[in-house]
Amino acid sequence: MGIAIRNSTEIKQIAQANKIVARTLEEIKKHISTGVSLKELDKIAESFVLSCGAKPSFKGLYGFPSSICTSVNQVIIHGIPTDYKLKDGDIIGIDLGVEKNGWFGDAAFTIAVGNVSQSEQKLINCAIDTLNFSIDIIQQGMRFKELSFEIEKYILEYGYQPLRSYCGHGIGKKPHEEPEIPNYLDSKNPKQGPKIKNGMVFCIEPMICQQSGESKVLDDKWSVVSVDGLKGSHYEHTIAIVNNKAVVLSQE
C-alpha cells in the first residue's frame, strides 16, 4: 500500500486523537501509586477516553482484552491489566491508543512507583532520552533505516539494548500502518529503503532492555519480556512531518 501522505486537515484529525491520548496519560499518572491495581488504572483510562467522546483503540485490537497496556518491571510492552497492586520500587509502562472520528493516536511512558534505584531510573531515562533524541534528528529526506540506525546507536551508547522483533509504526486511519520502524538497523545498509517525507505520520517507540534484546512472549500470549529476565522501559510519541520537521502530536 505504501506510506500514506496526510494533508493538513488529516493531520489535525490525527492530532485530535493524540491530544486525548496525552490528556488520558496525564490523568493515569495522577493515580499511579502503591496499592493501586492495574485493572483500576485500566478503568480510569477507559472512562476518561470515553468522556472525551473517543474510544480506547487497543480494546479488542488483535484480541487484546483491555484499554491500556500495563507493563510492570520485567514486562517491557503489551502487559495485560490484572488485579496486581503496584508496590514501592516497581516500574510501570503505560501504553494507550485512542480512536476519534476514525483517526488514531498512540503514546506510552514508563514511570517509577515510589523509590527506585539509580540504575532503574537510568533505564527509564534511556527510553525518554532516546525518544527525544530521535525526534530531534528526524528531517525530511532521511531514510527510515537511517533513523533506526541512529536510534540503535544511541541506545547502545547509553549502555542498553533495543528490544528486537517489535517496532514503531505508521498511524492514521488504522492504529498500525506502514512503515515499520525498528529501534535497530535490520539490514546492513541504512542508506536504502523509503525516505521520510512531509505529511507522513508515525510512532517512534524506543523499547529498552538491559543485557539482551532478544524478546520472549509470556504465557498470557501478550506480555513481552527480554530473555535476560531484567526490567525494561518504553516510551512512545506520535509525530507528523510538517515543514520538514518532526512535530509531536501526542502531547498537550
Image (tube, rainbow, N blue to C red):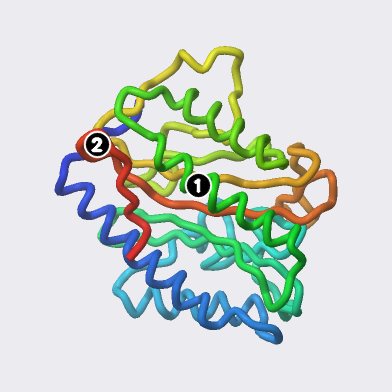
Which residue is label 1 attached to?
131
Secondary structure beneath label 1: helix
Q: Specify the quadrant of the image occupied by residue 116.
A: bottom right
Is 218 in front, or is 8? 8
> Quarter of the image containing the C terminus?
bottom left
Is 24 in front, or is 209? 209
Which percent across, then down, holds residue 191? 47, 14
Is 177 in front, or is 160? 160
- Kind of residue at disc 2: Gly
Secondary structure beneath label 2: loop
Is 68 in front, or is 162? 162
Which percent across, then down, holds residue 192? 46, 13
Q: Is residue 44 placed above or below 78 in the rendered structure?
A: below
Relative side of 165 to 46, left or right: right
At a point 46% along the width and 75% down the height, the residue shown is 46
Q: Specify the quadrant of the image occupied by residue 119.
A: bottom right
- Kind of residue at disc 1: Leu
Circle 1 or circle 2, nearest the eye: 1
Of the two numbered discs 1 and 2 on the same chain, state the one appearing first in sequence: 1
Q: Is residue 117 placed above or below 157 in the rendered structure?
A: below
Q: Is residue 146 placed above or below 95 in the rendered structure?
A: above
> Quarter of the image containing the N terminus?
top left
User: CB of mark 1 within 8 Å of CB of mark 2?
Assistant: no
Relative side of 63 to 244, left or right: right
Relative side of 83 to 229, left or right: left
Which residue is label 2 attached to?
199
